[in-house]
Image (cartoon, rainbow, N blue to C red):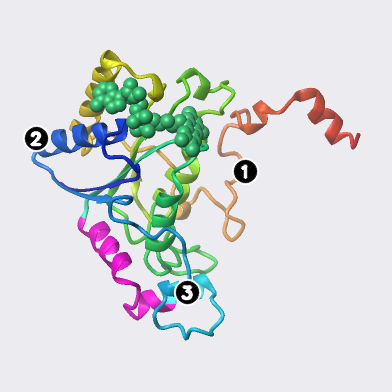
Amino acid sequence: MKILLVFAHPESRSLNGALRDVAIEELTAQGHEVRVSDLYADGWKSEVGHADFPLLPPDARLVPVAASKTAFEAGALTEDVKAEIEKLLWADVLILQFPLWWFSMPAILKGWVDRVFAYGFAYGVGEHSDKRWGDRYGEGSLAGKRAMLIVTAGGWEEHYSARGVNGPIDDLLFPINHGILYYPGYDVLPPFVAYRADRLDEAGFTEVAEGLRERMRTIGTVSPIPYRQQNGGDYLIPSMQLRPGLGDPAAPSFALHLNETREALRQAGE
Ligand code: FAD
């Protein structure tokens, strides 16, 4: 398979850098072809701005969605963005690798998504009608491809468990896995997360590296996260709400981490 690894760490000699090398080595040993976008090393521009849309007159008001649509349709996105889109179309599998910074991805990687996931390519795709709400959440330009996250976190695994104070890792990664990767169609694989990353010793590194190698060996076969397809009948259109009767009403949510007494007072208006 063809694999694109987008790497977002400022230091190549970091734990992330070492894990990236482990992943590439294993993928290559398995016969896969790997390309890397090393965002810091490449000096990736992360912020969206006027300069991203060469066709837009300098004094024109910038409306990012409209400018993205026009530029994508005209083939007039900037060369750095076009190169990344070409890599995404080339790859069967996309890997995003990053350290968890403030419960999310480093800004440079968010900026890669903001600029590369253009209107008409990653969103604004497909028919919008009373039957369909675009090709998204399981359908879209990148459907049929796989994607996964490799993440390092300073916190303990327990801190990210169902009742952990940080919130469950699957909830924290939901905006990336579901909102960024599943949205344009990727089948999203379970993430690989290395916890307590700042205190890793040699034995810990060996264990994490072996876990990562195993995940790289099964990258083509492991079952994706079973998100519901938007247009598969589970959602009402146009409200896009899950149909009554579907889903476990007792499923936990972020509310688990609200102080019950203060929340009761808040709801009572006190
Ligand atoms: P490095 O600092 O490069 O390495 C960590 C340790 O790994 C090293 O000290 C070393 O012992 C070991 N190591 C590195 N390379 C090797 C090797 N080749 N062989 C053996 N051992 C090695 N954490 C959270 O959990 N949640 C957050 O919200 C969060 N927010 C953050 C925000 C910011 C701005 C920052 C800077 C950190 C944050 N952290 C958070 C912590 C962060 O996730 C970790 O610092 C990061 O994941 C560590 O990865 P690294 O590649 O930078 O590690």
As measured in the structure, the alpha-carbon distance from the residue carrying label 3 to the one carrying label 1 is 44 Å
Number of numbered discs: 3
Query: Residue 149 lies in what quarter of the image?
Result: top left
Residue holding disc 3: 50
Query: Residue 269 lies in what quarter of the image?
Result: top right
The amino acid pointed to by label 1 is: Pro
Observer-nearest of 98 and 189: 98
Q: Is residue 55 left or right of residue 21?
A: right
Residue holding disc 1: 244
Callout 1: helix, strand or loop?
Answer: loop
Observer-nearest of 206 and 86: 206
The amino acid pointed to by label 2 is: Ala
Residue drawn at x 49%, y 18% is 158
- The percent position of residue 137, horizontal first and vertical second, equals 44, 52
User: Vertical placement of 81 versus 174: above or below?
Assistant: below
Callout 2: helix, strand or loop?
Answer: helix
The disc placed on residue 69 is none
Could you tell me if residue 224 is visible in this image? yes
As measured in the structure, the alpha-carbon distance from the residue carrying label 2 to the one carrying label 3 is 43 Å
Disc 1 crowd, CA 10 A, few/some/many (<14, 14-19, 20+)? few
Residue holding disc 2: 29
The span picked out in magenta is: 70-90
Callout 3: helix, strand or loop?
Answer: helix
Badge 3 or badge 1: first in the primary sequence:
3
Q: Is mark 3 within 8 Å of ligand 1?
A: no
Farthest-out residue, top? 203
- Quarter containing the C terminus: top right
